[in-house]
Amino acid sequence: MNILTIDPGTRCGWAALWGNGNIDSGVQEFPLGRGDSPGMRYIRFRVWFVDLLVLTKPELVVYERPFMRGGFATEFLSALTSRIQEECSARKIEYQAVNPATLKKAITGTAKSDKAAMVRAADERWRGHFCRSIKDDDEADALNLLSMAMQENRQTPPTSAGKNSKS
């Protein structure tokens, strides 16, 4: 099963599992250029996300549900998740949102884990699968979402170095 996971934001973490077991991940940024309207981030996200859907051909997209803290962050993340839902629906791809506390509890055993604990958990689980370090907490969250999605879909998450590396 091809699975794509997304940690939405201005720095968007992503991870993909292909049906053949290959795994890849990264971070995509959506900065505003000089003179850009704020809506350009949404356009750039949609173009990038559609390209990622075409590349990975997922049967399932899992994304981290925005924590509703108010202000710009809530508005922006809600808009990104709406685009995820819209594009998946248009392509008949199953999707699901995961609450941040649910993800933290599944990965570290406590719903109150900080970013550093989530990065450590991703590094421990995925060590050796990439020829590089995990870039940041956004990529770590996407990889942690992938671990959770694999377990829920009865696919074996990695436990030792190098077995599923695409690199």
Image (spheres, grey):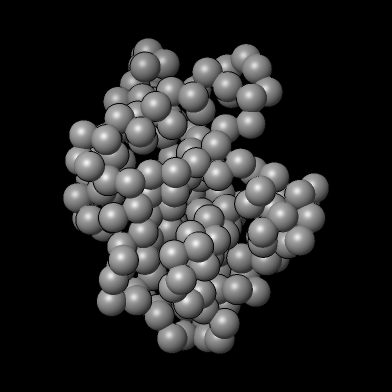
- Residue 134 horizontal/vertical position (percent): 55, 64
**47 lies left or right of 166:** left
Instruction: State which quadrant residue 47 falls in.
Output: top left
Which residue shows up at 62% across the image and 69% down it? 123
For the N terminus, which image quadrant? bottom left
Instruction: State which quadrant residue 39 falls in.
Output: top left
Residue 84 against residue 130 in the figure, above or below = above
Which residue shows up at 23% across the image and 56% down it? 57
**28 lies left or right of 76:** left
- Residue 86 horizontal/vertical position (percent): 30, 30
Nearer to me, 73 or 62: 62
**98 lies left or right of 17:** right
**26 lies left or right of 138:** left
For the C terminus, which image quadrant? bottom left
Nearer to me, 159 or 128: 159
- Residue 62 horizontal/vertical position (percent): 44, 48
Which residue shows up at 43% across the image and 31% down it? 81
Which residue shows up at 64% across the image and 25% down it? 68
